[in-house]
Amino acid sequence: MLPEKTDFVNAEALLQRLNGNYQQLYYIYEAFLKEHSDYATKIRNCAAEKDYDALKRHVHNLKGVAVNLSLDGLYHYCQEFEQAFNKIEEKERNRMVDRLAILMESTKQELTLLLRKADSTNVTGESLDTKAHDSNH
């Protein structure tokens, strides 16, 4: 059974690109959650400090990650953000940063639910705890 498509995560599309490898999909999404756990804070800090070059760089990087991982909602919003960035005033830019942070949190929640569902149905073939234990011996 393929993972379901949500407003934030199109796991089915990524799974197709991974040739149906559920385990790889699981680990990719798990790595995203770990590596981007504080990304919303970074983006908000850049906006607060008016470091717009860093802000644009973070949004652009996030857009690239989002498209590669089929995080469709995040990708489209980052694309919209980039297109509007130089055309809007600081106040609107800050609102867009806040919406992006909320969207990131929603995406992370969807991914967490997807991973929990995979754990409960044992989609990966074996639990991460077993793999970690086995690789240490």
Image (cartoon, grey):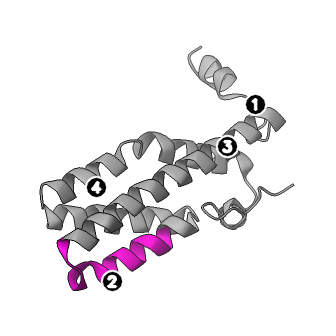
Q: Are marks 3 and 2 in contact (CB under 8 Å)?
A: no
Q: How crowded is the residue under tag 1: few (<14 C-alpha within 10 Å), some, or many (20+)?
A: few
Q: How many marks?
A: 4
Q: Which residue is mark 1?
A: 126
Q: Residue furthest top?
A: 137
Q: Are marks 3 and 4 in contact (CB under 8 Å)?
A: no
Q: Is residue 118 magenta?
A: no
Q: Residue furthest right?
A: 1
Q: Which residue is mark 3?
A: 113
Residue 77 falls in which quadrant of the image? bottom left
Residue at 56% over, 17% down: 136
Q: Which residue is mark 4?
A: 43
First in sequence: mark 2 vs mark 1: 2
Residue range (magenta): 75-90
Q: Quadrant of the N terminus?
A: bottom right
Determine the CA span between mark 3 and mark 2: 31 Å
Looking at numbered disc 1 in the image, what kind of residue is underneath it? Glu
Looking at numbered disc 4 in the image, what kind of residue is underneath it? Ile
Looking at numbered disc 2 in the image, what kind of residue is underneath it? Gln
Q: Which residue is mark 2?
A: 83
Residue at 60% over, 23% down: 132
First in sequence: mark 3 vs mark 2: 2
